[in-house]
Amino acid sequence: SQDGKIGIVLSPFWVEPYDVNSHADKEAVERALDYYLGWHLDPLIFGDYPKAIKRNAGKRLPSFTRKQTEMIRNSFDFIGINYYSARYVTRQLQSDPSRLRFTTDQHVEYK
C-alpha cells in the first residue's frame, strides 16, 4: 500500500444574485451552483445528481444504479476548489428548446 489519497479539484464560478431582493435571482444562484458544483460533488457526497439537474435534464441525464451509488458515494479523500472569479446571475426568462444543453438547462442568465 502506498497510502495514496483520491480527490477532485473543481474550478467553478461563484455566483451572486443580480438583484439581491429578487427571489427568482436567488433561485437562479442555487441552480447555477447545482450545475457548477453539485453536478460533480452531489454524486460523490450523496450518490446522485442534484434535483434541479435531474428535473431540467430529464431523460438526457444518465441515472446511477444502486450499486454505482454505493460505489461512488463518499469515494474521495479530499475536495479542492480553485476560485478565480464571481458572476451575477438572474433567472433566464426564455430558453430555446431546440438547444438543450448544460447551459440552457440551468435557466440562468449570467451578467
Image (cartoon, rainbow, N blue to C red):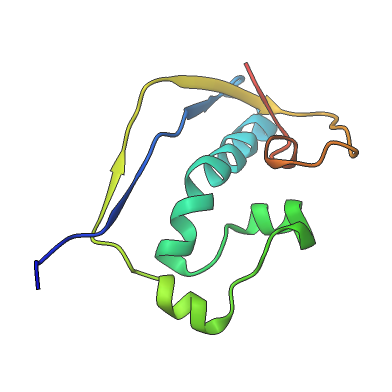
Q: Is 24 situated above or below 57?
A: above
Q: Nearer the viewer, residue 46 or 60?
A: 60
The quadrant the C terminus occupies is top right
Q: Residue 37 at what x, y percent from top left?
A: 47, 45
Residue depicted at 70% across the width and 59% down the height: 61
Q: Determine whether, in the image, residue 18 is placed left or right of residue 78.
A: right
User: For the point 56% across and 20% down, which residue is it?
Assistant: 88
Residue with the most extreme left position: 2
Q: Position of residue 18 (x, y in %)?
A: 60, 19
In the image shown, does 103 or 87 lie closer to the viewer? Answer: 103
Q: Residue at x 64, y 69 (%)?
A: 63
The tally of labels here is 0
10 vs 15, left or right, is: left
* Residue 59 percent coordinates (x, y): 78, 62
Whether residue 51 is situated above or below residue 13 in the rendered picture: below
Instruction: State the residue lying farthest toward the bottom.
Output: 67
Residue lying furthest front: 1
Residue 65 image position (x, y, % from top left): 59, 79
Quadrant including the N terminus: bottom left
Closest to the observer, 22 or 83: 83
Drawn side of residue 71 relative to residue 68, left or right: left
Q: Does 4 sit left or right of 50 as displayed?
A: left
Task: Give the residue displayed 61% in from the left and 25% down from the top.
Answer: 89
